[in-house]
Amino acid sequence: MMTASDAQKALKAIASPEVAQQSMRFFKTGPGEYGEGDIFIGVRVPVLRRMTAGYRSMPLDEIEKLLHSPIHEERLFALLLMVRLFGEGGPDEKNGVYDLYMDNTRQVNNWDLVDTSAPGIVGAWLQHRQRAVLHRLAESVLLWERRIAILATFHFIRHDDFGDTLKISDRLLNDPEDLMHKAVGWMLREVGKRNGVILRSFLAPRYSRMPRTMLRYAIERFQPAERKRYLQGEVKA
């Protein structure tokens, strides 16, 4: 049986101080920044993904230990492993992974951790289920839980199911965090890639009060002339 300790030893053996320093700057770990205090040891994401193949037998209680690690890469490894186990597992395994995730959302506490896990676990589990939990997360005081709410809908978007993305986007329209502006704008852009009419119908009565970053992300794939009209406030509701 693979344990959390096994994974931690393997990760530390391939850690790079140089990569760690780059990651600490990239993920804003300084005082007052969104990733303040997060610890990196320097293992890149492709390496972590490859490593999950050797840890499929790790029990969920051992994975939970990694989720509670102060080291970023250990939490990310746990989440990548959970995504893999969810994708390969049967109904009971999927349920176990989903429950573990939802019991530990406070540990999914940076944008990369959310983005690599929420669609493939939360969104996939809820595809044919009630989604009230996402709307509750969208009201959370925790930035990362709000990001889980909108990123989980990426899975729905890929199945041409846009309703929850639009409802949650509307709910998050006045979110104070720039990282949420980017996330909501990104998901709206993904809706538009599959159905431009729906995106434009959503934007028309709202774009003038959207945060600028959110709007720019949402209209990124529009033609330059149309983007300009939105940015200059010339599109009629």
Image (cartoon, rainbow, N blue to C red):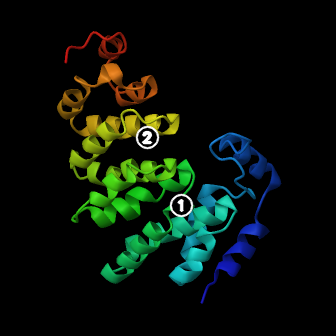
Q: Is residue 58 visible?
A: no
Circle 1 sits in a helix, a strand or a loop, which is it?
helix
Seen at 50% across and 50% down, the residue is 142
Residue 72 is left or right of residue 17, and the answer is: left
Mark 2 vs mark 1, CA separation in Å:
18 Å
Q: Which residue is mark 1?
A: 106
Vertical placement of 86 versus 136: above or below?
A: below
Residue 169 is left or right of residue 111, and the answer is: left
Q: Which residue is mark 2?
A: 183
Residue 27 occupies quadrant: top right
Binning the other alpha carbons within 10 Å of mark 2 as few (below 14), some (14 to 19) or many (20 upward) gives many
Q: Along the polypeptide, which appears first: circle 2 or circle 1?
A: 1
Q: How many marks can you see?
A: 2
Amino acid carrying mark 1 in the image:
Arg
Q: Quadrant of the N terminus?
A: bottom right
Seen at 19% across and 18% down, the residue is 237
Residue 226 occupies quadrant: top left
Q: Position of residue 73 (x, y in %)?
A: 65, 61
Circle 2 sits in a helix, a strand or a loop, which is it?
helix
